[in-house]
Image (cartoon, helix red, strand yellow):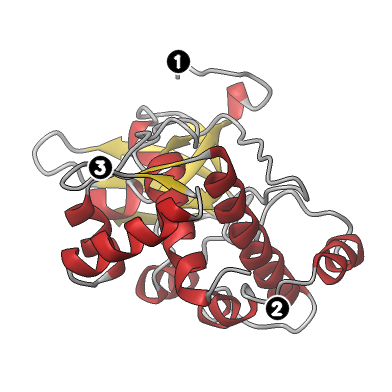
Amino acid sequence: MLSFTEENYLKALVQLTFFENSRQHEGQGKSEVGVNRLAAYLDVKPATVSDMARKLKVKELVDYEKYGKISLTELGKKEGMMVIRRHRLWETFLYQKLDFNWDEIHELAEELEHIHSIKLMNRLDQFLDFPSFDPHGDAIPDENGEITIPFRRTLSEVKEGKKCKMIAVNDNSIEFLKYVDKIGLKIEDEIEVLKKEDFDALTTIQFKQKQLVVSPKFTDNIFVLCATCLNAKECDC
C-alpha cells in the first residue's frame, strides 16, 4: 500500500502531466515534469522530490533518471487517477449531501482521499448516482481510473457579443471560489460577453440580469461552453 505522501506525489504528477497546460481539453498536458517544477507545486525542496522520485521508480510508478525529468508509468498514472477519483467523489458528497460550501470541500477531501476501500468508493459513487463531475466542474475518473473530458474553453477566449455557460473553474483556491460566490455566479449559469477592452483586457459580462467588469485573472479561470457549440467537439466562436 502506498503512503499518503506517495499518493500526494502521484496525484501532483497527474495534475502536472495530464491536466495542467491543457487548453480546451484536459489531457493535453506535458508527459513529463522537471524536479524543480514539482517541488514548487508541492512546496518542498528539489532534493526531497528527487528522493521520492527514486522511491517511486523502485515501485515502477515513475520513470526517472538523476538530473532528468519525471514521467508516470501506466501504473503510476492509474494510482494517481484513483486518488483524484476518491478526492472528487468526496467533494461531491460533502457538497451535495452535507451542504458544505464549494470553497470548504477541497481541504476536507484532501484527508478523505487516502481512504483506500474500493468497495466504499464504488458504493459512494452509486449513492451519488454516478456523477461525472465534481462541484467545481472537474471530471471524475471512473473505477478503472479512466476519465472523459468534454470540450471546453476559457471565458477569456469567448468573443465579444457571444453567449456561453460556465461549466467549471480552473482555480480551486478558497479566495477565488469565495469571489465567484460573492458575485453570484454558479456552474451552468449563462454568461454573455458584452465588451472586451483591448487596452487592459478587462471584460464586461452579463449574467442573471447583472453586469460586471472582470479582469483577465477571472476570465482565464472560468471554463465555459459557447451556447452555439454545446454539442460540438470543437468551437470557432
Sequence-wise first label, 3 or 2: 3
Q: Quadrant of the C terminus?
A: top left
Q: Which residue is mark 1?
A: 236
Q: Is residue 61 above or below residue 9?
A: above
Q: Secondary structure at mark 2?
A: helix
Residue ID at (39%, 59%): 171
User: In this view of the protein, can residue 215 be seen by the observer?
Assistant: no
- Real-space Cα separation, disc 3 to disc 1, in angstroms: 35 Å
Query: Which amino acid does the dot numbered 3 rest on?
Result: Lys
Which amino acid is tagged 1? Asp
The numbered dot on residue 140 is: none
Viewer-side label of 3, 1: 3
Return the residue at label 3: 69
Q: Earlier in the sequence, mark 3 or mark 1?
A: 3
Pick the residue in front: 14 or 102. Answer: 14
Task: Determine whether the residue tagged by mark 3 lies in a helix, strand or loop.
Answer: loop
The structure residue drawn at horizontal position 25% and vertical position 60%, both measured from the top left corner, is: 50
Residue at image position (54%, 45%) is 77
Where residue 116 sits: x, y (%)?
Answer: 72, 71
In the image, residue 109 above or below residue 26: below
Discs 1, 2 touching: Cβ within 8 Å:
no
Q: Earlier in the sequence, mark 1 or mark 2?
A: 2
